[in-house]
Amino acid sequence: MQKVWYRTSKGSWYGTFTEQGHQKQIRLVKAPKTKEGKKLAEAKLLEGAEVARHHGRRRRCPILAFSVELRSVRSGTCGWCRKDKDEVFDVAFSDKSFVGPMCKADLLRAVGTKVGAAEAKAPIAIPANGPVVAAK
């Protein structure tokens, strides 16, 4: 799960994400506590490059062959869930998998799906004679 929040003492937006079962927090951007500041921080969190650079894991992070262009924010209908939302982002994925309006939840889900696909685990080995089935 990814989350963006504001730390008043530092005047900055932070991101919280889970990595190998542990929560990590990083500073995303120094911006005022406004809707515009939050949107800027969310865009920074979606980039993902700041997370990898900050933790020095650039070599271990998979190379993602896509980017997301956030064109504008407005109210309207999400292109994925088809629900009317107060906040819909006009986005374009560089791999052309989606171009159009998308709500924040679906945008984070789409990016998570692409990142998860890059970090996919090795397939489970199945015995040559088929999977083992318990007899009753």
Image: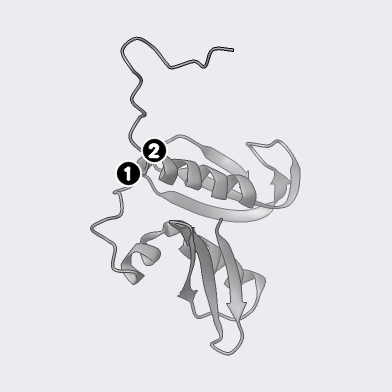
Q: Quadrant of the C terminus?
A: top right
For image coordinates 44% across by 17% down, the residue present is 132
Instruction: Please give the name of the residue rendered at 67% of the width and 54% of the height, measured from the top-left corner.
Output: 74
Viewer-side residue, 99 vs 16: 16
The label shown at residue 95 is 2
Q: Position of residue 30 (x, y in %)?
A: 50, 80
Task: Confirm or deny contact between disc 2 and disc 1 (CB under 8 A).
Answer: yes
Q: What amino acid type is highlighted by mark number 2?
A: Asp
Q: Dot 1 corresponds to which residue?
A: 65
Q: Amino acid at mark 1?
A: Ala
Report whether 62 appears left or right of 30.
left
- Residue 84 badge: none
Image position of 134 with respect to 4: above or below: above
The residue furthest bottom is 9
**Residue plotted at (36% across, 61% down):** 49
Which SS class for mark 1? loop
| Location of residue 64 in the rendering, given as x and y in whole percent from the top left corner | 33, 47
Q: Nearer the viewer, residue 72 or 25?
A: 25
On screen, residue 96 above or below 71: above
Q: CA distance from mark 2 to mark 1?
A: 8 Å
Q: Evaluate whether residue 60 shows in this view.
A: yes
